[in-house]
Image: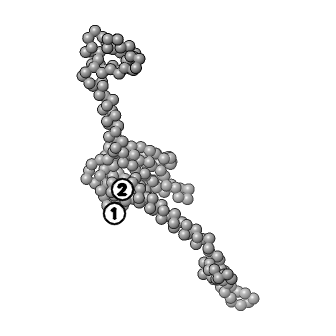
Amino acid sequence: ELVRKDGSHFPVEFSNSRIIFEGKSSSLTIIRDISERRQAKKELQKSEEKYRLLVESSLDLIVVHDFEGKILFNNKAVADFTGYSLEEIMDMTLKDMMPVSEISKLDERGRRRADGDMGSFTYDSMIKHKDGHLVPVNIRSTPVIENGEPTGILLIIRDITDRKQAEREIEYLARFPEENTSPVLRVNSEGTILYANKAASNQLTGWTPNAGDTVDEEW
C-alpha cells in the first residue's frame, strides 16, 4: 500500500524490470493503483458467497454434470433427497440416480444436446433413492455456458410427490361417477341434465336420461 497526501491508504501493484538508461543499467518501477480491482474482487467474493448460500439453502436439488453425465457439483439437498453422501454422489453419473425405465429418455436428450440443441428442457422423471424406492420429480435442464461454449448441464430438480398424489386423486374422483353402480345425474338450476352415468340409463325405469334433457317435474 501507499499513503496519499491526505493520509489515506490505497493498494498498489509494483512491476520492476531492468533497463539501460543513459548508458547505465537501471531499474524501471511501474506503480499501478489497484483500488478498483481490489474492490471488484471483494464484490465478486460477496456475490459468490450469496450464491453459495442460496444454492445450499435451496430445497430444490441442484446438480451440474458434464456431457457424459458425470456429476461435477451438487448441493446438500441432493444428498438429503437421495440418501447418498456428498462424496458418493461425486463418484456417480446421472444414470446411477435414475431407474432403468428413464435411461432411454435420458439418452435421447443427450443425443439432442450432441446435435447442438442447447435450449432448456423441462420434463417429469423419477429419481432412485439409495434404498431403491422411486420418487417423482420435475427437472429443468439448462446448458452451462462459459466463454461462449457449453461446458455442462445445470439441473434444477423438484420433488413432485404431492402433485402426483393430487393428480391421482383427481383422476379417481373423475372416474367415480362413471364407475358407480348407482344412477348419478348432474343437473343445473334450470333442470337441464349436464351429465348422466351408464347406471342412470340402465336402472331408471321408463326413462333414459341424456345430457341436454330436462328433468321431469316429478323428479
How far across and how far down the image is residue 18, in percent?
65, 85
Disc 2 on helix, strand or loop?
helix
Q: In which quarter of the image is the C terminus?
A: top left
Question: Mark 2 is on which residue type?
Answer: Val
Name the foreground residue: 144 vs 11. 11
Residue 28 position in % (x across, y down) = 67, 84
The crowding category of the residue bearing disc 2, from other C-alpha atoms within 10 Å (few below 14, some 14 to 19, many at least 20), is some
- Quadrant where the N terminus is found in the figure: bottom right
Q: Considering depth in this image, is 25 or 1 the residue closer to the camera?
A: 1
Please tell me which residue is depicted at 27% across the width and 14% down the height of the picture. Answer: 204
Q: Does 137 sit above or below residue 169?
A: below
Residue at the top extreme? 206
Q: Please determine whether, in this image, residue 5 is positioned above or below residue 217.
A: below
Report helix, strand or loop for mark 1: helix
Q: Which amino acid does label 1 sit on?
A: Glu
Q: Nearer the viewer, mark 2 or mark 1?
A: 2
Q: Can residue 65 be seen by looking at this rendering?
A: no
Q: Mark 1 points at which residue?
A: 87
Q: Which residue is drawn at 58% across and 68% down?
A: 40
Task: Give the residue at the far bottom of this rendering.
Answer: 24
Dividing the picture into quadrants, the one containing residue 190 is top left
